[in-house]
């Protein structure tokens, strides 16, 4: 059975996902195309050898509609014979793209494949695809007669049910910015970031979302972002502690990973950076929504025979501060190995691109420290989670 190896992983800098953000003037097709071009260029790969490109994108409407991945492949100048598809597993879309790509290699369907993702939240905001329509339908309403909730309410529920104080959440958020700023200043993201030339604008080569001066005391003044009278009555345990400061910001960005069979890598003279070891995807309560990362991690460790102590670095997506804190609480993971270069609270969360963005950072962390095993996990809308384990080579 072939092994799937990761030859390279790149990402754009993170731009604030609002009008005026550093990348807001870049079309998402061009944003994604730039990472594809960089990936093949810096590895001197003939794009005609790519069997498929699998991209993640959450809000597939407007400028991100009509198979944004195929459009990006064409915009990148790849031969028209290179196919592409776009998938949606919410925030885990590009992490799932990696799993599908690696599974294709292992099954013998692919020799060389690219997985990645894109999200331009400044131009294609969350909810745009729904267009005001009911996306649930009568049968789902019947199962959940009180209605499903958005992720902000789920984050509040996690904070309340795990007993995290507002101070704990703000301290965690400040730590994310501190670690990200320290890693950035030390060149810790240089290998993974590909600069973006903004039309008639500057060259963007640093994450716009990192705020080095962030402190827990400063975050304490921010108001609750999701307080709602309806949900106050429905969930009296909520203490309304989620703010714009202890949640990931709206973000623009793209990322891409080059995956091959070991045989193809050897044949074409590539030196892999890591090996895809295992993946796992689970469903979880769609009301609490964000805690599937806990069973996903337990299941992938059980299936691989690895223990938490074997893992040298964890990338747990910081959609909201209580998410990695709940994961750490239940699993007992080392604080030093959890998001050691900061996480999405500081580095941004470009939805469909976040999975491969985290993977690029995880590979770099293992290389920087000489670690062997890395685990990343991502909570997802609707109550799902992906987990992936890689081995540095």
Image: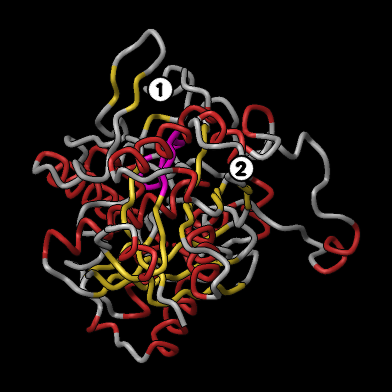
Q: Is residue 304 above or below residue 70?
A: below
Mark 1 to mark 2: distance in Å? Answer: 35 Å
Toward the top, the furthest residue is 200
Q: Is residue 62 above or below residue 165?
A: above
Q: Nearer the viewer, residue 82 or 324?
A: 82
Image position, residue 334 (x, y; %): 21, 74
Taking 311 as reference, is 293 left or right? Answer: right
Q: Which residue is mark 1?
A: 21
Q: Residue at x 28, y 41 (%)?
A: 42
Taking 168 as reference, is 69 left or right? Answer: right
What secondary structure is found at the residue carrying circle 1?
loop
Q: Which residue is mark 2?
A: 81
Q: Which residues are magenta?
A: 245-256
Q: Quadrant of residue 200?
A: top left
Q: Nearer the viewer, residue 243 or 345?
A: 345
Q: Residue at x 81, y 54 (%)?
A: 136
Taking 246 as reference, is 100 left or right? Answer: right
Look at the image and say whether residue 254 sits in the magenta stretch.
yes
Look at the image and say whether residue 149 sits in the magenta stretch.
no
What secondary structure is found at the residue carrying circle 2?
loop
Q: Quadrant of residue 127?
A: top right
Q: Nearer the viewer, residue 341 or 198?
A: 198
Q: Mark 2 or mark 1, which is nearer the start of the sequence?
A: 1
Question: Could you classify mark 2 by the number of other residues whose Cα lies within 10 Å: few (under 14), some (14-19), or many (20 or more)?
Answer: few
Image position, residue 18 (x, y; %): 47, 25
Q: Residue at x 87, y 55 (%)?
A: 137
Image position, residue 227 (x, y; %): 55, 44
Image depth: mark 1 or mark 2 in front: 2
């Amino acid at each position: 059975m072939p092994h799937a190896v990761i030859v390279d992983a790149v990402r754009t800098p993170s731009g604030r996902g609002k009008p005026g953000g550093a990348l807001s003037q870049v079309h998402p097709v061009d944003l994604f195309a730039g990472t594809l071009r960089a990936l093949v260029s810096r590895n001197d790969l003939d794009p005609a050898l790519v069997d498929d490109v699998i991209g993640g994108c959450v809000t597939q409407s407007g400028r991100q509609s009509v198979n944004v991945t195929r459009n990006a492949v064409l915009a990148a100048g790849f031969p028209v014979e290179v196919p592409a598809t776009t998938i949606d597993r919410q925030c885990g879309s590009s992490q799932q793209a990696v799993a599908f790509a690696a599974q294709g290699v292992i099954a013998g369907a692919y020799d060389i494949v690219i997985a990645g993702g894109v999200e331009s939240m400044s131009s294609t905001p969350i909810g745009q695809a729904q267009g005001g329509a009911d996306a649930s339908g009568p049968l789902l309403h019947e199962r959940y007669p009180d209605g499903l909730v958005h992720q902000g309410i789920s984050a509040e529920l996690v904070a309340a049910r795990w007993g995290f104080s507002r101070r704990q959440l703000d301290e965690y958020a400040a730590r994310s910015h501190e670690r990200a700023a320290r890693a950035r200043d030390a060149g810790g993201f240089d290998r993974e970031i590909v600069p973006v030339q903004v039309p008639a604008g500057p060259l963007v080569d640093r994450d716009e979302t990192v705020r080095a001066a962030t402190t827990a005391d400063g975050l304490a003044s921010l108001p609750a972002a999701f307080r709602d009278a309806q949900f106050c009555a429905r969930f009296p345990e909520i203490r309304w502690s989620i703010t714009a400061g202890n949640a990931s910001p709206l973000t623009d960005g793209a990322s891409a990973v080059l995956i091959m069979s070991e045989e193809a890598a050897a044949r074409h003279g590539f030196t892999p950076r890591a090996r895809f070891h295992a993946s796992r995807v689970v469903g979880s309560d769609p009301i609490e929504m964000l805690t599937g990362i806990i069973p996903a991690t337990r299941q992938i460790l059980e299936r691989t025979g690895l223990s938490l102590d074997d893992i040298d670095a964890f990338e747990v997506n910081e959609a909201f501060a209580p998410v990695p804190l709940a994961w750490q609480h239940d699993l007992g993971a080392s604080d030093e190995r959890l998001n050691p270069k900061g996480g999405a609270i500081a580095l941004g969360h470009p939805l469909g691109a976040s999975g491969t963005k985290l993977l690029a950072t995880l590979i770099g962390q293992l290389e920087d420290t000489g670690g062997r095993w890395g685990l990343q996990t991502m909570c997802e809308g609707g109550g799902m989670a992906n987990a992936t384990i890689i081995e540095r080579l």
